[in-house]
Amino acid sequence: MSRITSLLTRFDPETGKVEGVQGVSRRLADLRGAFADPVAFEEALHKDNPIVYTVSSVTPGDGKGDLHYGVGVLFPGTVGQEYYLTKGHLHSWREAAEIYVGLHGEGRMLLEDEATKESTVVELLPNSTVYVPGHTMHRTINVGPVPLLYIGIYPADAGHDYREIAKRNFRTVIVEKEGKPVVMDREEYMRSLPQMKTGR
Ligand code: PA5
Ligand code: MN
């Protein structure tokens, strides 16, 4: 056990900041290509470049069987009708699964099987856990009015692979319609955008 750097982690339940950890912030500009509506994205970015989410990763050890985890905070907001989201990734070690624990706010996990491309949406809520199987693209989405706080726990050698998502993105989006989250096919949502109708 001596090779483990720390057994106890304290984090701020408001900000998600972890004591002694320099978190990573993802701003709107870092999410180019992630949202389905490029016109709404450029308009939003023209106004402001807010922090969309932060992740503070804890890496107590890198040995065989060790675990890493990240405390994530995803702020509320939309680009066009699409709710704020994380980039999403596969694990570099494809077999690696992950457990997400919801702590605060109202979120969804968008899961997409890498091989079959089948999409599944699972609620990410306080007092619940979501199991993300291996070989599954996963993205977190905040569908509520307050910051979404969660922890993701994964094998130390899982690794984050963003290439596949950057290439083809997820097939499904979650959009706000009359104040409620609605799951839609990405292509269908894109066809419904005003610029697709007016040729803008
Ligand atoms: O490891 C995880 O799955 C999480 O901690 C994510 O890294 C976090 O939700 C941020 O998402 P992404 O890594 O896709 O930017
Ligand atoms: Mn992951």
Image: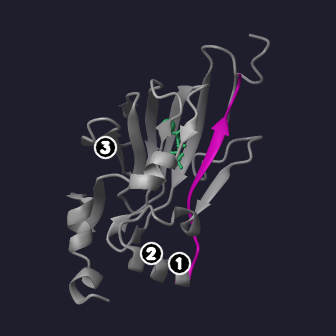
> Residue 41 shows which numbered tag?
2
Q: Nearer the viewer, mark 3 or mark 2?
A: 2
Which numbered disc, 3 or 2, marks the residue that appears first in the sequence? 2
Q: Give me the residue at 58% from left, 52% from top.
A: 14
Choose top left, top right, bottom left or bottom right for residue 5. top right
Is residue 53 inside the magenta stretch? yes
C-alpha distance separating marks 2 and 1: 6 Å
Q: Secondary structure at mark 1?
A: helix
Looking at the rendered structure, the kind of residue marked 2 is Phe
Which amino acid type is shown beneath numbered disc 3?
Glu
The residue where tag 3 is placed is 123
Which segment is the magenta one? 47-61
Q: Secondary structure at mark 3?
A: strand
Q: Earlier in the sequence, mark 3 or mark 1?
A: 1
Relative to 118, 11 lies left or right: right
**Image quadrant containing the N terminus:** top right
Disc 2 on helix, strand or loop?
helix
Q: Nearer the viewer, residue 111 or 104?
A: 111
Relative placement, left or right, of 10 versus 38 is right
Whether residue 48 appears in magenta in the rendering, the answer is: yes
Q: Please give the residue where the numbered disc 1 appears in the rendered image.
A: 45
Amino acid type, mark 1: Leu
Residue 73, relative to residue 118: is it above or below? below
Q: What residue appears at the point 31 percent right and 35 percent down from the top-left corner?
A: 115
Q: Callout 2 environment at 10 Å: few (<14), some (14 to 19), or many (20+)?
A: many
Outermost residue on the top side: it is 1
Nearer to us in this view, 59 or 168: 168
Q: Quadrant of residue 191?
A: bottom left
Instruction: Name the side, left or right, on which 114 lies relative to 55.
Output: left
